[in-house]
Amino acid sequence: MLSGVSIVCFAGSYTVAFVLEVTRLLFRSGIRGAAMLGFAGAGLFAHTVFLYHRAVHAAASPLSSERDWYLVAAWLLVGVYLYLTYYHPKTAFGLFVLPLVLGLIGVAAFLADPEPFARGPASRVWGVIHGVSILLAVVAMLVGFAAGLMYLRQSWRLKRKLASHGGLRLPSLEWLQRTNSRALVVSMLMLGLGVLSGIVLNLIRRDDRVPWSDPVVLSTLVMLGWLVVTVGISIFYRPARAGRKVAYLTLMSFVFLVIALGMGLLLDTRHGGQSLPANHKTLSSNTSVNPPTAHCPLPTAHYPLPRAGGLA
Amino acid sequence: MKVQVVGCSHHSASIAVRERLAFSPEQTRAALEALRQAFPKVEAVLVSTCNRVELYTATENAAGGPSHRQAAEFLARFHGLESAEIFEYLYQRAGHEAVEHLFAVAASLDSMVVGEPQILAQVKQAYQLATQNESTGPLTHAAFQAAVKVARRVAAETSIHQRRVSVPSVAVADFARQIFERFDDKNTLVIGAGEMAEETLEYLRDEGVHEVTVANRSADRAAELARRWHGRAVPWENLSDALVAADLVIGTTGAEEPVVTLDQFEAVEAARFERPLFVLDLAVPRDFDPAIGDRPGVYLYSIDDLREVCEKNRRRRDKELPAARRIIEQETERFMADMHHRVTGPIIRQLKEGWEKPKEEELWRLWNKLPELDDRARSEIRQSFDRLVNKLLHPPLESLRDESRHGIPHALLDALAKLFQLKD
């Protein structure tokens, strides 16, 4: 029965949770918190079931398509949202996090390639490391982006000496700044690991290597460079660790992320085994693509989780 | 059933009167014990805070508890006073009004600063103390537990508790707490020794501040304030260094000119590395150049800024008061209906038992006459009898429930007792 769960089911639940978050700005309610958690929780359950079925019934490595990659990123972000909302029910995290979740699901549904990639056993371990680390880097960047937006909104209110709006309660600047800084460091470390594992993957392939000039590879390297510089500045230039500067740095990181993801989605790239014309890729959600036999899972592609039974 | 409250509050009595009537926890225990000796069947809770002293009593039968005059005399006598001395300051409410009053007190609608959160904890403490002292019973349990629920409902469905209306409370709750996550690792610098600084420090101490630095032109006054707050005094000449180390600053000097100009602050700023700084300028004229508020990481609030927020909060809170009052009314109606319906419990039980017996007798006769009935048939017949009894009982029980909404339905209870020959 649960195999009938579709993207619409959990996207709908998250949308209702988001609408309930928006109503914080309009009126107070004693049951809204429970309803929000209920809808988001139900959505997460459906989301989990959906991903489980995708993983179990995948012809190739489980959850290894571009679409799955976006859906897993959204799934992790919903987990972060539920955790924060459960422990801080009066804080409007959802207003900033749920749009990102819905955006990821939207990209998964309309832009991302649903076809899985076949891969050889030798590259599977590196593929897992590569895919998971890039995924965590992206989730950390999205969390940092949401925290950055909240910081700027909160700082704007406090500078203008406005009393807090009952419905739009946000965390303290200190909490947001700490979250921002940690998100930057985590995303840099994860992205660094992802890039390193991607390089190894590319080197162990015998044929059909992804060129180092591939737009996805280049944009990812630029993004990593930006994060390294950002974290370096934070370490050696103390004012960059405090206040709005950290928020601006995380917002800028998000811009790089969008560029990198956009390149993977819209440009002709061989990264991830893709080599289709751009106009074809934008319609790829219902298109069956036969990928090259070897794979190259750099950033925006997919992460190949091992099937039960081992990584060999 | 009789629920009653006798007491005084900031509405009816000055602090001098309230002080004379106040009860310490030990006195409360002794008073409840004494009351129980005088009225063995009474349930009682004594609420004593700096703004109110109230004795709540409840009895199943009106005759078992003290009248309001007896309750007033009890309060006076306990403190060695003549009841005439305090009678004019006391109020009394009974039944519906007493319950409504308790709900309003717990929800902080009757407080001096409407919406202040401490009163609910004080009501809960009073109830716990009475329970430990075995002075409570089913009526007070129901009333005080309902009061706590009502207070939570008011807090959840209105923003009354979030609308602070004093300058220090707004400064801390609406601004400082939005900047800092924790205060136990923050340094608070007090410049000057104004009265409002101490009030603000009290709020900050509640949040966890314990590192206080005082700078004053008068070293003695600085030392005195630092001693009271377990902080340290710094020489006036070291103000810049103190500003570098500070996370929160409270300015309360009586200086004619700004104590910290923009130029002075820019010298400090470099050493602070743009660490967030909360500045509460309570001085008139102001101690801080307003341009400092535009510097990155600085959140500067003057007394006028905060008064404006206080006034807005007051207006918003006043707008929410009717909604809070409606909740109190609804919950009081519901509580009273439940209480009245409780009184009808014995009659309902007797009615049900009275019909159960003939039903069982008839079934027994039937089983004897029709021994060939199998278990399934017997079960069906029993269910039919049960349905019949329930349908017959439904109209009188429904009437009892309806009448209970308006008070104890004595006439209906009498009629049912006579009609069905029920014992009292």
Image (cartoon, grey):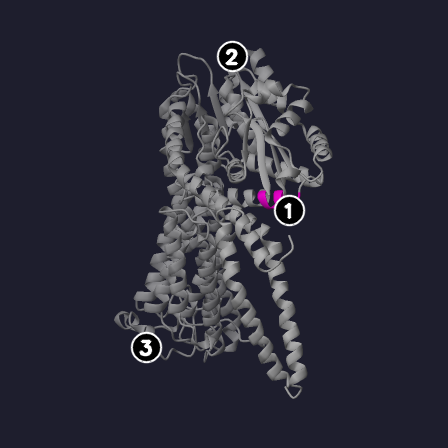
| Type of the residue with mark 3 | Thr
Q: Which of B47/A311 is in front?
A: B47
Chain to which the residue tagged by mark 3 belongs: A
Give the residue at x 50% y 33%: B116
SS of the residue under disc 1? helix
Q: Which residue is denoted by mark 3 in the rendering?
A: A287
What is the CA distance from the residue labelled 2 to the residue labelled 1? 62 Å
Residue that badge 1 annotates: B138
Closest to the camera, between mark 3 and mark 1, is 1
Give the residue furthest to the bottom.
B372
Badge 3 crowding class, 10 Å Cα cut-off, few under 14, some 14 to 19, many 20 or more, is few
Q: Residue B164, relative to residue B1: is it above or below?
A: above
The residue to which callout 2 is attached is: B217
Q: Which amino acid lies under the numbered mark 2 shown in the image of this protein?
A: Arg
For disc 1, the chain is B
* B229 sits left or right of A129 in the view: right
Q: Earlier in the sequence, mark 2 or mark 1?
A: 1
Relative to B261, B338 lies left or right: right
For label 2, the SS is: loop
Residue at the spot x=61%, y=26% of the render? B72
Rendered location of residue B377, percent (x, y): 60, 83
User: What is the chief secondary structure element of the magenta stretch?
Assistant: helix
Which region is colored magenta? B137-143
- Give coordinates of residue B329: x percent, y percent: 46, 42
Q: As rendered, which of B365 and B226 lies closer to the eye?
A: B365
Q: Is residue A154 magenta?
A: no
Category of crowding for the residue at label 2, using alpha-carbon neighbours closer than 10 angstroms: few (below 14), some (14–19), many (at least 20)? some
